[in-house]
Amino acid sequence: MQAEYRRIVLEAAIIFLLGAVLGLSFNTRLVIDAFSGKVVASTRPVLAPPSSGTTPAGSSGTTGPEALAPVALPFPTMLSEVRELVEAGALLVDARAHEFYLEGHLPKAVSLPLGEVDEQLVEFMQSVPKKTILITYCNGYGCPDSYDLGVRLMAEGYEDVRVYEGGVPEWRDSDLPIEGGVQ
C-alpha cells in the first residue's frame, strides 16, 4: 500500500512539474513582464453601449449584448505616464470599495467604487467635466474593476478614460505617497 501511495504522489508531482514547465515556456515574456512591474495589456474584448443616444429602428431601447459596440481604452504603459498625466490635470478615480479607498489611495484620487457606480454616478458627473482625462485604478494586475469602470465612464460620455493596471500595489511599491489610512 505504501509503495502504491508513493507511486501516485510521484506521478502527480511529475505531471505538475511538466505542466509548470510547459506553462512557463509558453508564457515566458508575460511572466517576466509581470514580475518586472510592466503593464500587461489586457486582450479581453471591451463592450459598451453606443454613445449616440439613439436607438436603431425596431429596437426596444434596451442595452443588452446586441446593443453593445467595441470600445478601446488606452492604457498608460508606464507609471511615469500616469504621473505625467496627473501633473497635466488628469483625475485619478479609485474603483475599489470605499473602505479600501479610506485605508489608502493615490494622491488627490476620488472614490467611485464600481459596486456603487449606479448610486454615485450622477454626483460624479455633476462635479467632473466630460473633457477631463480620467485614470481609473484598483488593486493592481488582475483587478478588473478599473477596466470595467473605465468602460462605464466612456459609455456615459467621458472622452478620455485611461486604466492604470498597476494600481495601488505598483504605486506603493515605487515608494510613491499614499493618502489616507496608515502609511
Image (cartoon, rainbow, N blue to C red):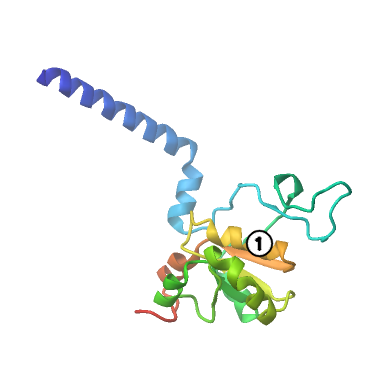
**Image label count:** 1
The percent coordinates of residue 113 (x first, y second) are 53, 68
- Which residue does the image show at 27% across and 29% down from the upper left? 13
**Can residue 147 be seen in this snapshot?**
yes
- Which residue does the image show at 65% across and 81% down from the upper left? 89
Quadrant of the rendered image containing residue 20: top left
The correct choice, above or below, for 44 with respect to 155 in the image is above
**Three-letter residue code for mark 1:** Arg
Give the quadrant of the N terminus.
Answer: top left
**Can residue 90 be seen in this snapshot?**
no
Determine the residue located farthest toward the front in the rendered image. 60
The percent coordinates of residue 21 (x first, y second) are 38, 34
Q: Secondary structure at mark 1?
A: helix
Determine the residue located farthest toward the right in the rendered image. 57
Q: Nearer the viewer, residue 142 or 68?
A: 68
Quadrant of the rendered image containing residue 109: bottom right
Q: Report whether 132 appears left or right of 53.
A: left
Q: Report whether 137 appears left or right of 59.
A: left
The correct choice, above or below, for 77 with respect to 178 in the image is above
Give the quadrant of the C terminus.
Answer: bottom left
The correct choice, above or below, for 125 with respect to 19 in the image is below
Q: Nearer the viewer, residue 148 or 85?
A: 148
Q: Report whether 157 appears left or right of 11.
A: right
The percent coordinates of residue 174 (x first, y second) are 44, 70
- Which residue does the image show at 12% across and 18% down from the upper left? 3
Q: Report whether 162 appears left or right of 17.
A: right
Q: Which residue is mark 1?
A: 152
Q: Nearer the viewer, residue 148 or 83?
A: 148
The percent coordinates of residue 8 (x first, y second) are 22, 22
Quadrant of the rendered image containing residue 130: bottom right
Label 1 packing within 10 angstroms: few (<14), some (14-19), many (20+): some
